[in-house]
Amino acid sequence: MSFGHRVEKGYAVVELRGDVDLARSPEARALILQCLEKKNDLLVDLSEVAYIDSSGVASLVEGYQMAKKEGLKFGLIGVSEAALNVLRLARLDQVFPIHADLDTRIADDG
């Protein structure tokens, strides 16, 4: 897994790539929480995720819960089919706001 981070159009965007598994999810978690600690609305780009396990999903859930607690926006964008299958299995596709991309999220903000 590799990751990137940028601020665009009022959102911190965390880009996760490759496998988000037990070995790599602590890095993803740290980056997600770091963005939220700075009081940034956050989108996690999963378009390049080939595999995500329960530890990776737990990092997303923790970020979502922290954002909600802090009154920040949180969502997923560009979710790959592999990641979406895992989210569907856990029924988290019904919990996380999921958008095609950043511009779609912004349009949905109204």
Image (cartoon, rainbow, N blue to C red):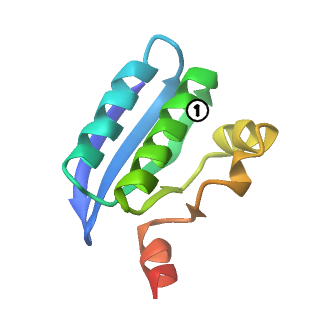
Q: Nearer the viewer, residue 12 or 71?
A: 71
For the image shown, how many numbered marks are present on the structure? 1
- Residue at coordinates 51% horizontally, 45% vertically from top-left? 46
Q: Position of residue 67 (x, y in %)?
A: 40, 52
Inspect the image, locate mark 1, and give the three-letter code of the amino acid beneath it: Val
Residue positioned 38% across, 30% down in the render: 28
In this view of the protein, which residue sits in the foreground, 59 or 17? 59
The kind of secondary structure element at disc 1 is helix
33 to the left or right of 17: left
Instruction: Please indicate, yes or no, whether residue 53 appears anywhere in the rendered image.
Output: no
* Residue nearer the viewer, 47 or 53: 53
Q: Which residue is mark 1?
A: 57
Identify the residue at image location x=41%, y=45%.
66
In the visual, does 28 lie left or right of 98?
A: left
Q: Nearer the viewer, residue 101 or 109?
A: 109
Residue that appears at 50% across and 75% down: 104
Residue 103, x across and y down, in percent: 43, 75
Question: Which residue is at the far front?
Answer: 69
Q: In the rendered view, does 21 fall on the left or right side of 17? A: right
Give the farthest residue toward the bottom. Answer: 110
Above or below for 108 versus 84: below
Percent across and percent down for residue 84 are 69, 45
Q: Residue furthest right?
A: 89
Q: Does residue 48 appear in this view?
A: yes
Callout 1: few (<14), some (14-19), or many (20+) C-alpha neighbours within 10 Å? many
